[in-house]
Image: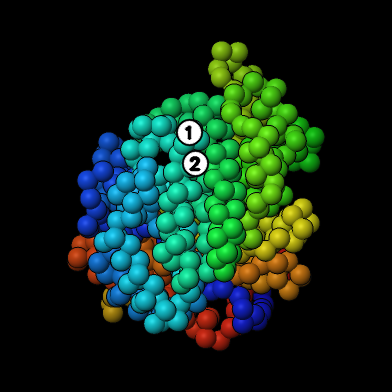
Amino acid sequence: MSKQQIAIPDDFILGAAASAWQTEGWSGKKAGQDSYLDAWYKQDRHVWHNGYGPAVATDFINRFEEDVALMKAAGLTHYRTSINWSRFLTDYEQGTVDEEYAAYYDRLIDALEAQGIELMLCLEHYELPAVLLEQYGGWASKHVVELFTRYADQVFARYAGRVSRWFVFNEPIVVQTRVYLDALRWPYQQNTHTWMQWNHHKNLATAKVVKLFREQGYSGSVGTILNPEVTYPRSAAAHDQQAAEIYDLFYNRVFLDPAIKGAYPAELMALLQKHDIQWDYTAEELALIAEHRVDEVGLNLYYPHRVKAPSRAWHAETPFHPAFYYEHFELPGRRMNPSRGWEIQPRIVWDMAQRMKQEYGNFPWFIAENGMGIENEARFRQENGEIQDDYRINFIAEHLYQALLAREAGCNCLGYMLWAFTDNVSPMNAFKNRYGLIEIDLEHQRQRRMKKSAHWFRTLRDSRQLTLTLDDEDK
């Protein structure tokens, strides 16, 4: 065992992330402004842990001044959240701005500027207006792509002079994977054709928004936030290697490659054709994606993903699913977060950094989300009321260390952002697993309290030095 210390560059982001729907609550929300998440919660509240969902969330919309002061106290240099598309407009077809909701963002930006915290804004964090899902099938529709571009135009017109780092999507693959590929979430369908159509239209929307931003001459950058699953094969055997490569095509490169390289992988296109996946795209759309790539990417990195070659035959009457080519694999003896059921392996940060350097031309990126959710966290509360979350401090330190090592090795890693600033609502899990530097006490009017990790994060920011204890094998 030995202590290691590594410097944090002055321009390295030390921030935290959230989203509109997971924090704001419904206060002031008008009829017809439900998002996909709101509709799901209303339809299936019983599947959300203890019935908590987006209705109140952390009530950030009414308490943001208090929370921004806590961001300052916790040492955040940056804060990333989203604008809720479903609430920013009152008419999605015409692009009519809800001035009341827009003014709330004016005040939020004022508060963050006063505290010296840079706001990074995402245009869509699962907040597809529910009516567009009902009327057009959501991102299956090219018309929805146009409506999204119209929405982005209004957002840029209002805030582009005050916000310089923009992101089109957060985890654009997630909703359609849960709904249309695996049928795990409302409205519970299984249609790989629709899944791929949503993928394509989100890639197309990204290119259109990038094009719009640049043609309007706004200063700043436009990126996107992806959640690549750092994927390892069970073994060096060719069949396991192939399983990992194909998994990577369907779940990672389907968004990484268009965003950074401007094209879908040829291997993915061949597999989609082989399995007769029907999705509508044109040469003009592919050209648009090629010509308008993002400026940077945020990468949400939580845990490793392991696969092996399939050991069972695929039923002839079962429609194609990418799992035709792989099975999930659990590494014996793996280190676990038992609350979340996720393996803990900080090495994913280093490995992803090397991939960005070697396969994607050292494209600029940062960790947009990384964090540790713990159930029944109140059991770690001291007599003074503060939660002693040393496990979170260790988790952050281990992953941040890998990012800083990668930066020293020449990887273009721009920073680290924690998920999340406060405890907040997650899909279905609600407040079951707590992720925040700041506790949200649901039993006492959502009172805020700094956890031990918040004080540690402030010291980290002020000192620009990370110290941690490592086993010799981890150096």
Task: Name the one closer to the observer, 247 or 452.
Answer: 247
In percent of width and height, residue 407 lies at 70, 71
Task: Name the one closer to the observer, 253 or 287.
Answer: 287
* Number of the label disc, if any, that sits on residue 25: none
Question: Which residue lies under the disc numbered 1?
Answer: 141
Q: Residues within 10 Å of mark 2 (few under 14, many from 20)?
A: many
Q: Residue at x 70, y 32 (%)?
A: 269
When the figure is inspected, residue 411 is found, relative to residue 126, above or below; the finding is below
Callout 2: SS: helix
Amino acid marked by disc 2: Val
In the rendered image, the residue lying farthest to the top is: 317
In percent of width and height, residue 456 lies at 47, 79
Q: How is the image coloured?
A: rainbow
Amino acid marked by disc 1: Ser
Q: Residue at x 73, y 29 (%)?
A: 270
In percent of width and height, residue 198 lies at 52, 36
Q: Residue at x 22, y 57 (%)?
A: 28
Question: Which residue lies under the disc numbered 2?
Answer: 145
Pointers 1 and 2 in contact (CB under 8 A)?
yes
When the figure is inspected, residue 41 is found, relative to residue 219, above or below; the finding is above
Query: Image check: 8 left or right of 391?
Result: right
In percent of width and height, residue 27 lies at 22, 58
Callout 1: SS: loop
The CA distance from mark 1 to mark 2 is: 7 Å
